[in-house]
Amino acid sequence: MTNAPRLEKITPDNIEAALALRVRPDQEHLVAPVVKSLAEAYVHPDAAWPRLILDGDRPVGFLMAFFDIDWRGDGSRADVRSGLWRLNIAAGEQSRGYGRFAVESVATEIRRRGGTLLTTTWHPGEPGPERFYLGLGFRPTGEKSEDQTVGELHLR
């Protein structure tokens, strides 16, 4: 990191920069492209929180969080969760602390909203982000979301 990273809402002024972000080619099957995330944010405006990650004026990543969703999807709202929905760190920007910054930013927003638990999912194995999430303190719940591991981080 050269400057303190920051988050910005996706706007007409930065949408092209967000859409241009690409993960490494060997990771493309592990995370949806930003364009899909923005389409999902459009159809889930009450839950989705898409943000561009900038270092100075340089786009380095994209995150999308979710807040207070019915995890089971059965309408009972018995299992309401918040967490990290997507994380795309640009290929040339990985291993520079931007992913950690993104997770910490989502944790801060969940705490601000009164939450104490951050949920995310990841594809297990290499070259996936499992070691990254485990290193941040996430623990697998034993659940699967499609073929992804569900993990949670208890917030203090």
Image: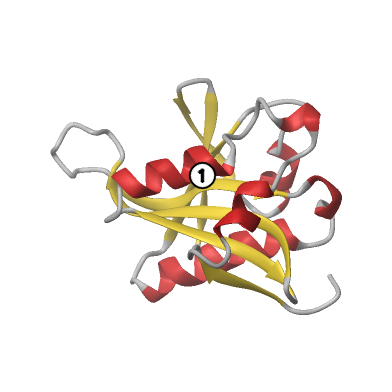
Q: Quadrant of the N terminus?
A: bottom right
How many circles with numbers are drawn on the protein? 1
State the residue lying farthest toward the left.
76
Identify the element where label 1 is drawn: strand
User: Residue 101 in the image: x percent, y percent?
Assistant: 67, 65
Compared across the picture, whether 85 is left or right of 131 comes to left
Q: Which residue is depicted at the point 66% across and 27% down? A: 124
Compared across the picture, whether 149 is left or right of 113 comes to right
Compared across the picture, whether 33 is left or right of 41 comes to right
Q: Which residue is mark 1?
A: 120
Tell me if residue 68 can be seen. yes
Specify the amino acid type for callout 1: Thr
Tell me if residue 156 can be seen. no
Q: Which residue is depicted at the point 78% across and 62% down? A: 97
User: Residue 146 in the image: x percent, y percent?
Assistant: 46, 21
Seen in the picture, residue 36 relative to 21 is either above or below; the reply is above
Seen in the picture, residue 82 relative to 113 is either above or below; the reply is above
Seen in the picture, residue 146 relative to 31 is either above or below; the reply is above
Compared across the picture, whether 136 is left or right of 147 comes to right
Q: For the residue carrying disc 1, how many other residues have a C-alpha within 10 Å: few (<14), some (14-19), or many (20+)?
A: many
Q: Which residue is depicted at the point 46% across and 54% down? A: 65
Which color scheme is applied?
A: secondary structure
Q: Which residue is depicted at the point 24% across and 33% down? A: 73
User: In the depicted view, which residue is nearer to us: 140 or 88?
Assistant: 88
| Quadrant assignment, res 140 | top right
User: Residue 144 in the image: x percent, y percent?
Assistant: 47, 26
User: Residue 72 in the image: x percent, y percent?
Assistant: 27, 33
